[in-house]
Amino acid sequence: MAQLISIDDLTQKKPLNPKGFALFELAFRPFFLLGNLFALLAIIPWVLALHGTLALPQFSTWWHAHEMIFGFSLAIILGFLLTAAQTWTGVPSVRGRWLALLVVLWLLPRIGLVFLPDVPLAVWAASDFLCHLGAWCVLARMIIQVKQWRNAPFLALLLLFALLSLASYYAQATEQMVWVTRIHYASVGVIAVVLNLMGGRVIPAFTQNATKYGRKPESPWLLRLSNTGLLLMAVFWLLDAPMALQITAGLTALVLFYRWHGWGWYATRNNPLLWSLHLSFVCLPLACTLLAFAYPASGALHVLTVGAIAGLIVAMTSRVALGHTGRMLKAPRWMPLAYGLMFLAAILRGLAGLIHVWPRAYLPLIDAAMLCWVVSLLIFLLYYTQILLRPRLDGKPG
């Protein structure tokens, strides 16, 4: 498990400064770069639309939710899975022109939904679906070839994402706005399952490898119980069953807190690449706790989406990009600020959920959260754009 991210020869007496273009050498490169860039750019018109400054119909509530889930979050998930599966299975992943095709299929709806609003949604839905289907086929080939069935749940989750994206497009096209909200909430619940699966693999492994923390074997029941709880939350969101959601969220929060506590968070305070992972993951049980106590859904959901999902994305992509490009596992100088700002964005956006109590503070809190979000992602891109575009330092493929 500790070899999820394979890193060889991290130290070299004469580090190379390779030139060339390596964006399509492995899936993490284009999806990490473009996904984070899209997240930075897409939040600005949305906040302007909330202020009434940018009154364009394409910047709707549906667009914001759909693009943050299926544009931003799913791009990072695809980049991670299609890269990590190569390490898990030993089977080469997609690269070159076929990887570029997947990226184009992902990118077309991101551009088209904004700049070509008159094109039928079915066109962009088809492009997204083909991207999801292509990624599913690549992952399935790798898992089936070596019969590594323990990773089969990721295939089911990718297929579920593809269907939820289609359902979101259909609900918007047919103006079924109640179902739009339910589908998006449920989709966030499914992403939480992915975070729980991936986080449970890499966070304790990374922590154990980089610190003196001695991890005890985790009971498989903790993963099963927490994943079951998160999946049930997705179902209850879809069915609009608030009481069942509250009870399930409370029980799931307890399991997630207990699970996270056993990963050695207290041994990471001097390592930003580690404490950022722990800080982001703990937002998941925190959001579940807020839901259990009937905190406004918008606020609790954004603690999950900004704190856990976006926070883990910034923390994970910054760590994985270093390892997979043959660099030292040391956070660049200003990256701890990026990690902290994303967590602060989650807190501020969570507080904005109290709009009924403090309506005059809503937009200032949104603006402050957006500023934290933008600066966090900007710091990431300033450091990592060159890293993701150029070949590995050690000259190895990938």
Image (spheres, rainbow, N blue to C red):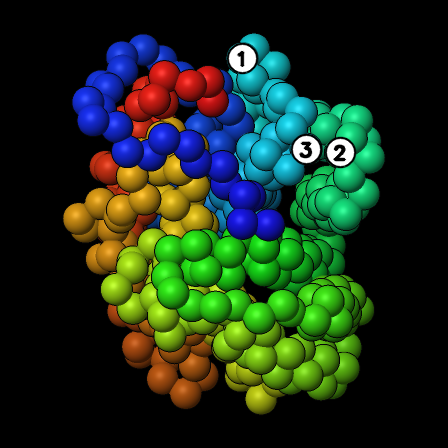
The span from disc 2 to disc 3 (Cα, nearest Å) is 7 Å
**Quadrant in which residue 106 is drawn:** top right
Contact? badges 3 and 1 (CB < 8 Å): no
Q: Residue at x 77, y 39 (%)?
A: 148
Badge 1, how many Cα within 10 Å: few under 14, some, many 20+? few
Q: Tell me if residue 233 comes above or below residue 76 in the rendering.
A: below
Tell me if mark 2 has few (under 14), some (14-19) or many (20+) residues whose alpha carbon lies within 10 angstroms of its own: many
- Say which element carries label 2: helix
Circle 2 sits on which residue? 143
The residue type indicated by label 3 comes to Thr
- Within 10 Å of the Cα at label 3, are there few (<14), some (14-19), or many (20+) other Cα atoms? some
Identity, as a three-letter code, of the amino acid under mark 2:
Ile
State the separation of the CA atoms marked 3 and 1.
20 Å
From the image, tell me which residue sits under label 3. Answer: 89
Q: Nearer the viewer, mark 2 or mark 3?
A: 3
The reply to whether residue 213 is visible in this rendering is: yes
Q: Label 2, label 1: how many angstroms apart (C-alpha)?
A: 20 Å
Residue 38, how many percent across, how many down? 41, 38
Q: Is residue 168 left or right of residue 104?
A: right
Secondary structure state at the residue bearing disc 3? helix
**Comparing labels 3 and 1, the label whose residue is closer to the camera:** 3
Q: Residue at x 34, y 54 (%)?
A: 273
Q: Tell me if residue 183 comes above or below residue 388 in the rendering.
A: below
Q: Which numbered disc, 2 or 1, marks the residue that appears first in the sequence?
A: 1
Give coordinates of residue 309: x percent, y percent.
50, 57
Quadrant in the picture for residue 220: bottom right
